[in-house]
Image (cartoon, rainbow, N blue to C red):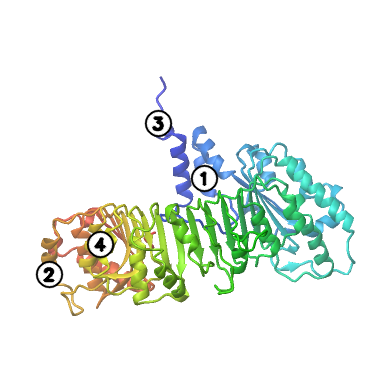
Amino acid sequence: MPVYPPAQALPLLVLEAIFRHVLSAPPAIPTLECDRNPPTKQVALLPIMSQCRAWRSVAAAIFYRSAKMWPEQLVASDSHKKKHLSLSDIIATGTHCYLRELIIHVYIPDFAKSWEAGQNLGATLSGSGDLGSVSRLELTITADVGLGHSCAQSNEGEPDRELVDKNVKIFAKQIRHALPNAQSVSVYHSVRYPRLGTAKFEDECVLSNMDQLVGPNPVRLSLDRMPITKQFVNGLSETTLRSITISMHTGTQQHVELVRRNAASLERLRINRSTHFSVIKMTCDSRDRNSTLVYPRLECLHISMLTGSRGANMRNPLADPFPRLHTLISRGYFPFRTPGVLVGGKSHIRHLDIDMDAGLQVMLKDCNAFDKGAFSKLQYVSLGWATSGAVWGDYSEQLCQMSTEMCAQTRVVRMPNTHIRHMAKLTPTFEYARQLEILDVPHCEFTIDQCIAMLCGCPRLIKANVGLIELSSVTDKRMPPVEVLQEYQEKYKACTSGVRALGIRNTRFGSARQAGECLVLLADILPSIKRVTVSLSSKRSVSKILRAITLASKRPVYKGHRLHKEVEFSSGHCW
């Protein structure tokens, strides 16, 4: 029986997890952000692929996962080709079986030329062979060349509309033939310069044929800066679309109709930089102004950066339009003037992330929407203020109590930009969520006594990010006397906590030496802590605190303790 080295005996799933960690460690706090970030060559995987056949098969599935196609006009330099994998590279190496995502840059003026020339994107697709493994297609529609040039001005007159239409239809057939299994389609309309003359005409010709390029049956559709037509909306199937993303567009009536038509099948909806009014219209039945349009299968609703404001004259859903919603994210102003979506979601929302404002908080308090134990299945809650709206005082204290007591099953609590300086009466509220594992309250300032009480009062807590303030028994800038440290050690020697990582985002001490002393004392009292991360706005202050930690840990009161061997003190973000 052959004997394999331990590295070769690892399961493939374990290898994949390791290789992905080599590229970039996943975020500790789950996020649904999906901003456009075109993939590049993962050069860190190249040495791994040369180790052995088993490792290569796993690493190759990551390395060759995504490829790009672009016309020569859009390639700024050879460095662009070196940075990205092209479809030609994939085909030449015979690794197209690993390909899952294809990004095509479409240069609009090419459609005004002869498509049979054999030097265009369609010819490359036609000669690529079987690309049935590709499940995601991204189209970037542009008339801009390189890094700042535009073809917008032309004196040649309008091109042949029939020729443009014909070439777009031919290219659409080539896409569907080469990518028969592409269920996810993203379209990005690159607009960096005003369209004039010929370029504007070509742009309109291509956009009017967008239904041909996207195809009739996408499962996931993402439109970025994309104007759409009634023809496009009517050409899509009403039964297959599961996910829609509309980004960087105010939201025309056709965008609203696109969402409405697919209400019965949608499972995920993301609206970015649209208007409040467009979102409200999506929840109103077009056949009856007073009826709510219900999305029976929608599970995730992500709304961000809306323009406008909640007005009294806005129609709002009379009933809960999302009876199966489990993820609700609203960045910027919450669009709904009534709390129906939140009140109706008490029994099924599991992930709640909302940027608050004073009017919304008053509305929620008046209707008891976020009362103690109001939600039954909530796992993740983030209630905070946008950076420009960060506040202190009663609003923040109410928000803290809402966040920690909405559900006893909550595992993650975040309060971004929520400033609280006196946590004495709020510390006990953290004990309500007995399942709490991650706490991110960087602007809530705890004394060491309050911090210990909070960390020990949450038995399942493994990671916390907090603010820390000076010891009450030390009133000057000098380091605490040995007697004070020993008093704390004796007072809390029976305390237990499961926290392994502690982040300090905000401090208020008389000196860096005091801050360092307090952190060392805290890590000494709670032996579960393995890592302490200091992240302040001033790098100089962080450096001073880290030097103070090194000095403080050498004091005789900590001699023989675990600090030097088991606790890592560092700078950076806890998350």
In the image, is 332 to the left or to the right of 533?
right
Could you classify mark 2 by the number of other residues whose Cα lies within 10 Å: few (under 14), some (14-19), or many (20 or more)? few
Is 440 drawn above or below residue 172 in the view shown? below
Residue 426 placement: quadrant: bottom left
Instruction: Give the number of the disc on residue 5.
Output: 3
Q: Position of residue 133 (x, y in %)?
A: 64, 38
Residue that mark 2 sits on: 484
Query: Sequence order check: which comes first, mark 1 or mark 4?
Result: 1
Query: Sequence order check: which comes first, mark 3 or mark 4?
Result: 3
Q: Position of residue 312 (x, y in %)?
A: 55, 74
In the image, is 192 to the left or to the right of 21?
right
Is 169 drawn above or below residue 341 in the view shown? above
Is 375 drawn above or below residue 475 in the view shown? above
The foreground one among 251 and 343 is 343
Q: CA distance from mark 1 to mark 3?
A: 20 Å
Direction top: furthest residue: 1
The foreground one among 290 and 315 is 290
Q: Position of residue 119 (x, y in %)?
A: 81, 49
In the image, is 505 to the left or to the right of 32?
left
Q: CA distance from mark 2 to mark 3?
A: 54 Å
Residue that mark 4 sits on: 454
* Callout count: 4
Q: Position of residue 293 (x, y in %)?
A: 60, 57
State if disc 1 and disc 2 touch (CB < 8 Å): no
Q: CA distance from mark 2 to mark 4?
A: 21 Å
State if disc 3 and disc 2 touch (CB < 8 Å): no
Could you classify mark 4 by the number of other residues whose Cα lies within 10 Å: few (under 14), some (14-19), or many (20 or more)? many
Residue in the image at 34% along x and 58% along y: 373
Residue that mark 1 sits on: 45
Q: Could you tell me the amino acid type at mark 1?
A: Leu
